């Protein structure tokens, strides 16, 4: 199975400051169709996960442009340019390139 | 708009069975693979199964293989998960999602608690 390793586990941030989350996979995430299936999700307490970014760097509809995704191969990053209060919660990366599809352990973002 | 509504969760004893349903709307159900994900309390999500539009491709996580069965009824725009021989470690919120490689849409989830 592909292991997804996120860091840090916890990320205290100051409002208005940038934040960055790393996600590393144990295998290259390029699928046979040429796409790299690395997605990012945000989950608030008591809510379902919501996808923010798909295929490394594509922002979902309605996601603020302060969120951006980058990376390739086995090394990926989610960046928030200026953290807002509504950004608190847990962020997960997920790979859809190799079955079984797997998630990272999560990064909890909280306001300092 | 895309909507996925899960139902069927509840409290069940170890060794028991439960059938979950997911009602889909707002998109052409027969165009998409569908998948079940679960999330145990305080843990990250775990993919458990997917099914192709015509039900001819099905896959399961090792943790549920031989105990859970995924199915769909395209006439009713519905996805199902039959769960047998339930264990305490199956306790989780169960979500249905669209497109297993992308998981762009999730339902609100249904809670399954396995306890004596």
Image: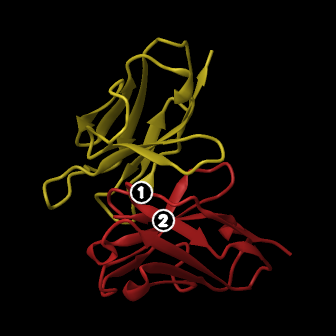
Chain colours: A yellow, B red
For the N terminus of chain B, the image quarter is bottom left
| Vertical order, A59 against B66 (above or below) | above
**Mark 2 or mark 1, earlier in chain:** 2
- The one nearer the camera, B28 or A8, is B28
Question: Left or right: where does residue B70 sit relative to residue B104?
Answer: right
Question: What whole-number distance in Å separates the C-alpha atoms at marks 2 and 1?
Answer: 8 Å
Q: How crowded is mark 2: few (under 14 residues within 10 Å), some or many (20 or more)?
A: many
Residue behind mark 1: B105
- Residue at horizontal 32%, vertical 60%? B101
Residue A83 seen in this snapshot: yes
Task: Please identify the quarter of the rendering in which residue B105 is found.
Answer: bottom left
Q: How crowded is mark 1: few (under 14 residues within 10 Å), some or many (20 or more)?
A: some
* x, y percent for residue A104: 47, 46
Q: Residue furthest right?
A: B116
For the C terminus of chain B, the image quarter is bottom right
* x, y percent for residue B4: 48, 65
Q: Are marks 2 and 1 on the same chain?
A: yes
Asked which secondary structure carries label 1, the reply is: loop
Asked which secondary structure carries label 2, the reply is: strand
What subunit carries mark 1? Answer: B
Mark carried by residue B4 = 2
Task: Please identify the quarter of the rendering in which residue A68 is found.
Answer: top left
Question: Left or right: where does residue A90 sit relative to residue B54?
Answer: right
Contact (Cβ within 8 Å) of mark 2 with mark 1: yes
Question: Left or right: where does residue B102 sit relative to residue A48?
Answer: left
Residue B61 seen in this snapshot: no
- Residue at horizontal 33%, vertical 56%? B102
- The one nearer the camera, A111 or B107, is B107
């Amino acid at each position: 199975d592909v292991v997804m390793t996120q860091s840090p586990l916890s990320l205290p941030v100051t409002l208005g400051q940038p934040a960055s989350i790393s996600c590393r996979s144990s295998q290259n995430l390029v699928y046979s169709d040429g796409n790299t299936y690395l997605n990012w999700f945000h989950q608030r307490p008591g809510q379902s996960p919501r996808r923010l970014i798909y295929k490394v760097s594509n922002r979902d509809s309605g996601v603020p442009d302060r969120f951006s995704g980058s990376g390739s191969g086995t090394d990926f990053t989610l960046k928030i340019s200026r953290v807002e209060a509504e950004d608190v919660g847990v962020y997960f990366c997920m790979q859809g390139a190799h079955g079984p599809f797997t998630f990272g352990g999560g990064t909890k973002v909280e306001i300092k | 708009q895309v909507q996925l509504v899960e139902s069927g969760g509840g409290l069940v004893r170890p060794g028991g069975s439960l059938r979950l349903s997911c009602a889909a709307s707002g998109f052409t159900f027969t165009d998409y693979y569908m998948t079940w994900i679960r999330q145990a309390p305080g843990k990250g999500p775990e993919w458990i199964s997917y099914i192709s539009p015509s039900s001819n491709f099905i896959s399961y996580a090792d943790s549920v293989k031989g105990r859970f069965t995924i199915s769909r009824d395209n006439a009713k725009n519905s996805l199902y998960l039959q769960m047998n021989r339930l264990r305490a470690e199956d306790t989780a919120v169960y979500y249905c999602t669209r497109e297993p490689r992308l998981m762009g849409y999730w339902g609100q989830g249904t809670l399954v608690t396995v306890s004596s």
